Image: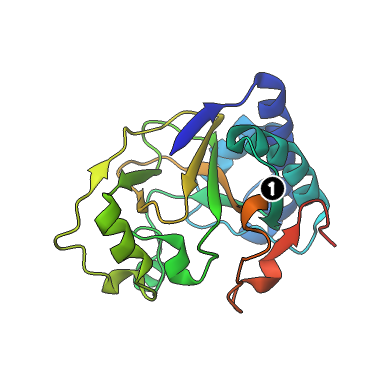
Amino acid sequence: METSVVDKSVQKEIEDIVLLLINNNADDNGISKSETLDGLIDNLRSSSFFKIDKTNKENFIKLSNVLLPVAESMLQEDIAFCEFPFNVRVSHATAPTSYLLSDFPTDALHCDPWYGEPKNSTNFLYYVYISESSSFVDFYQTGEKDVEKLKSFSGKYQLFDWNNTALERYPKQVEMARLIMFDSYTPHKTVRSGTDIRISIDFRVIRKQYADNIKFDNKVINKYYKKGEYV
């Protein structure tokens, strides 16, 4: 796992795009719009759920064009495919019960390929807004023997047997404008222990070295596009 804090100009570009995305979905989610991201954050604190419509691709294209060069810089390698649209999430202090009881809640410790994501993908998580009272993502590392155990499993997150699996928690990374890069088999989970919201962006990429041999699961094949070809 590696992390980097993006520079101020990139941070501002991302915040402006996220402001547009949330404002465009404010009415459908029953919150007031705002001219500033800080104002929107205040409005979001009074909500319990927020969903962003991904059908309008324009702002998601802008977002990927800002973040992919930063991701390539961290990878030190060209990106062949990327998940599109990126996931822009508003995470609340309390998750809906129906979500927690579903087959693939991020609050359960998991690896993304268990859901059917490409096994050779690289994940990125960016914190647009986070505070000490926000939910955050916890990451863990395992030994080589346990990685093979993780790779042999597929299915509902709660069904994996974590007994006899060595886990070492990475230091907590809670900082606005921080981009976190991690392998698809890095165990991670959402932790909700406060009262504040979190706004974050996550996406997956496939590096050029894996592009020829990648096998897409049918559930996600339509989510991955050649970099720059989003339509």
Badge count: 1
In the shown orientation, is residue 71 left or right of residue 143?
right
In the shown orientation, is residue 87 left or right of residue 103?
right
Camera-nearest residue between 5 and 51:
5
In the rendered view, would you say 161 is above or below 26? below
Q: Position of residue 163 (x, y in %)?
A: 15, 63
Residue position for label 1: 79
Q: For the point 31% across and 46% down, which residue is it?
A: 140
SS label for mark 1: strand
Label 1 sits on what residue type?
A: Ile
| Residue 35 seen in render | no
In the rendered view, would you say 143 is above or below 72? below
* The C terminus: image quadrant: bottom right
Using the rendered view, name the quadrant where residue 37 is placed.
top right
Outermost residue on the top side: it is 8
Which of the colour schemes (rainbow, by chain, secondary structure, one colour) is used?
rainbow
* The N terminus: image quadrant: top left
In the rendered view, would you say 108 is above or below 194? below
In the shown orientation, is residue 143 left or right of residue 131?
left
Q: For the point 80% across and 59% down, which residue is it?
A: 56
**Pointer 1 local density, CA inside 10 Å: few below 14, some 14–19, many at least 20:** many
| Residue 75 seen in render | yes
Q: Position of residue 106 (x, y in %)?
A: 40, 59
Q: For the point 55% across and 65% down, which residue is it?
A: 118
Q: Position of residue 171 (x, y in %)?
A: 31, 32
Outermost residue on the left side: it is 164
Q: For the point 72% across and 22% down, which residue is it?
A: 9
